[in-house]
Amino acid sequence: NAGVTQTPKFHILKTGQSMTLQCAQDMNHGYMSWYRQDPGMGLRLIYYSAAAGTTDKEVPNGYNVSRLNTEDFPLRLVSAAPSQTSVYLCASRWDRRNYGYTFGSGTRLTVV
Amino acid sequence: QKEVEQNSGPLSVPEGAIASLNCTYSDRGSQSFFWYRQYSGKSPELIMSIYSNGDKEDGRFTAQLNKASQYVSLLIRDSQPSDSATYLCAVNWALNSGNTPLVFGKGTRLSVIA
């Protein structure tokens, strides 16, 4: 099993551009989430999905997701802003509250 | 407001000592508690989970949970320089559906000095 795979690992984006961060897992986990991590701020939840076809959000502005199947959970930055410069972490887990997440290796995004 | 609080540190302990990391949470109905270790430049990795009051031991790690005090801790015995990392506390909040995201604290940076 590859676990949780995120691409790209690094990217520089210009303000106003859009891009999609890819996340895929091969563990048949129903639950997937996107977090961003900034220095001194810990992990902040952006979006989560309890199953294919469902999504819910914590941070509504500037991000969008889709969950068309179990494996993939891409995060789209609609019109990038410098405030979205961060490390983005994708995670998945089994559909039971007592299971912890498995994290991907992250995407380090810089918006200039 | 769902909150998970940790002392940011740094917490410095000598090699071989016991490191004690603490975490408090705001929602009394929380069900599951997790400790993650994160090395600099790497993603978090799960090291302990605990669901019931009391202690849970795994090798050099012991997680302690006190739901009445809304407090969870992680003890690392015989601390090694390789334990130097940021430790994140995470809580699964109770909702009717059971499908809830984890909420993380900001982490405590641990430094084990040889």
Image: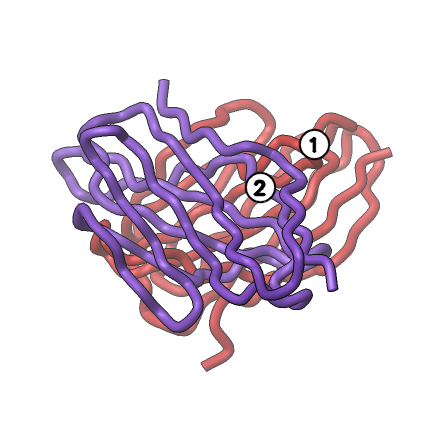
Chain colours: A red, B purple
Task: Using the image as rendered, state which of residue A93 and residue B104 is in the foreground.
Answer: B104
What mark, if any, has residue A63 been given in the picture? none
Residue neighbourhood size for the residue with mark 1, other residues' Cα within 10 Å, grouped as few (<14), some (14–19), many (≥20):
some
Question: Residue B42 location, x and y as percent?
Answer: 66, 59
Count of labels in the image: 2
Task: Using the image as rendered, state which of residue A46 and residue A17 is in the foreground.
Answer: A46
Question: Quick check: B74 above or below A39?
Answer: below
Q: State left or right for residue B27 relative to residue A79.
A: left
Give me the C-alpha separation between circle 2 and circle 1: 24 Å
Amino acid on which the number 1 mark rests in the picture = Gln
Task: Using the image as rendered, state which of residue A31 and residue B2 is in the foreground.
Answer: B2
Instruction: Pick the quarter of the image with the C terminus of chain B.
Output: bottom right
Q: Nearer the viewer, mark 2 or mark 1?
A: 2
Corner quadrant of residue A106? bottom right
Q: Residue at x 27, y 60 (%)?
A: B56
Q: Residue at x 61, y 49 (%)?
A: B86
Q: Residue at x 43, y 28 (%)?
A: A58
Disc 1: which residue: A84
Question: Residue A57 location, x and y as percent?
Answer: 41, 31
Question: Quick check: A16 above or below A101?
Answer: above
Question: Residue A97 location, x and y as percent?
Answer: 23, 50
Question: Quick check: B74 above or below A40?
Answer: below
Q: State left or right for residue A54 relative to residue B88.
A: left
Instruction: Pick the quarter of the image with the N terminus of chain B.
Output: top left
The chain letter for the residue carrying disc 2 is: B
Disc 2: which residue: B108
